[in-house]
């Protein structure tokens, strides 16, 4: 084999690997956060692609002879990478749902702040849960499973083969439903206690109309809500990590 053919084949394989890995890391939690420098994300994706290229060189499709064929392969690999990264990103959105529901119950829904994990403004509890989840993902080495999911995707989605849109859409729908369910489960204790608290305030307002229950109840709601959050925060995050890991294991299973 001539040198130019060897170099051209290696560059083609590197490009194919980079399109999938780079697209996945573009939206994947931890690696694709808006506050992470674009240069760091690019260098990391290039480094991972360079390490995977020799391993996946034999499974790469033949080089297309036309520009249209090359663009088709690039688009197919990009869609596969975006699909993998979107699954993990959807699981992160469960914390946004949980934070919104918890904030409504503890009286902090009006406390808006910038959420660096979502690059948008939101309530303070959603920002806290999102940033804490990112820290725990790296502290518990779950980011290794994210990378492993991208690597093992080559055994499920062959390079150059189009992503099955119907199956992918159904899977994304199930993940979104599970994400909303996880958010509801995380906020369930606060919802129950908040309902009981509001029922108690309603009874007090009926029995003693002279008391301004809003001015009395709001400070108590915040105090007891933050106390409950402090006592249950570790349990909530352990529960979320278990569900997050479970979905990653489903991806890794053949």
Image: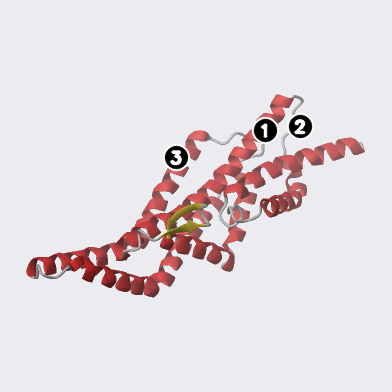
Disc 2 secondary structure class? loop
Residue at 37% across, 62% down: 186
Determine which residue is flagged by label 2. 63
Rendered position, 64 above or below 46: above
> Which label's residue is closer to the chain start, 1 or 3?
1
Vertical placement of residue 40 versus 202, above or below: above
Q: What residue is drawn where x is 21% and y is 65%? A: 214
Q: State the separation of the CA atoms marked 2 and 3.
A: 32 Å
- Closer to the chain start, of discs 2 and 1, is 2
Q: Which residue carries the number 3 mark?
A: 170
Placement of the N terminus among the 4 image quadrants = top right
Q: Residue reaching furthest left?
A: 207
* Residue behind mark 1: 73
Give the left or right position of residue 197, taking residue 70 as reference: left
Which of pointers 2 and 3 lies earlier in the amino acid sequence? 2
Where in the figure is residue 39, as x and y percent of width and height? 70, 52
Taking 11 as reference, is 237 left or right? left
Q: Is residue 6 left or right of residue 104?
A: right
The x, y position of residue 3, in whole percent, is 91, 39
Q: CA distance from mark 1 to mark 3?
A: 23 Å
User: Which one is nearer the viewer's eye here, 42 or 12?
Assistant: 42
Number of numbered callouts drawn: 3
Q: Quadrant of residue 98?
A: bottom left
Question: In this rendering, does residue 52 appear at all?
Answer: yes
Q: Residue at x 66, y 39 (%)?
A: 159
Residue 33, quarter of the rendered image? bottom right
- Between 36 and 243, the one lying in front of the other is 36
Q: Secondary structure at mark 1?
A: helix
Mark 2: few/some/many CA within 10 Å (<14, 14-19, 20+): few
Residue visible at 32% across and 73% down in the picture: 223
């Amino acid at each position: 084999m001539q040198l130019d053919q060897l170099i051209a084949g290696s560059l083609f394989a590197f490009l194919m690997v980079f399109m999938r890995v780079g697209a996945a890391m573009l939206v994947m939690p931890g690696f694709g956060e808006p506050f992470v420098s674009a240069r760091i994300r690019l260098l990391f994706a290039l480094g991972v692609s360079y390490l995977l290229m020799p391993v996946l060189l034999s499974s790469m499709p033949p080089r297309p002879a036309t520009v249209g064929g090359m663009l088709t392969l690039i688009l197919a690999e990009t869609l596969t990478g975006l699909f993998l990264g979107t699954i993990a990103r959807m699981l992160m959105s469960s914390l946004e749902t949980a934070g919104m529901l918890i904030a409504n119950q503890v009286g902090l829904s009006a406390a808006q702040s910038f959420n660096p994990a979502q690059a948008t403004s939101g309530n303070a509890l959603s920002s806290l849960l999102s940033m804490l989840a990112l820290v725990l993902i790296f502290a518990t080495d779950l980011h290794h499973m994210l990378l492993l999911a991208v690597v093992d995707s080559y055994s499920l989605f062959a390079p150059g083969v189009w992503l099955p849109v119907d199956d992918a859409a159904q899977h994304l729908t199930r993940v979104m439903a599970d994400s909303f369910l996880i958010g509801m489960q995380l906020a369930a204790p606060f919802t129950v206690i908040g309902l009981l608290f509001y029922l108690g305030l309603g009874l007090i307002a009926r029995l003693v109309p002279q008391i301004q229950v809003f001015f009395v109840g709001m400070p108590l709601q915040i105090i007891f809500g933050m106390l409950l959050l402090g006592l249950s925060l570790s349990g909530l995050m352990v529960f979320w990590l278990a569900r997050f890991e479970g979905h990653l294991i489903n991806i890794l299973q053949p």
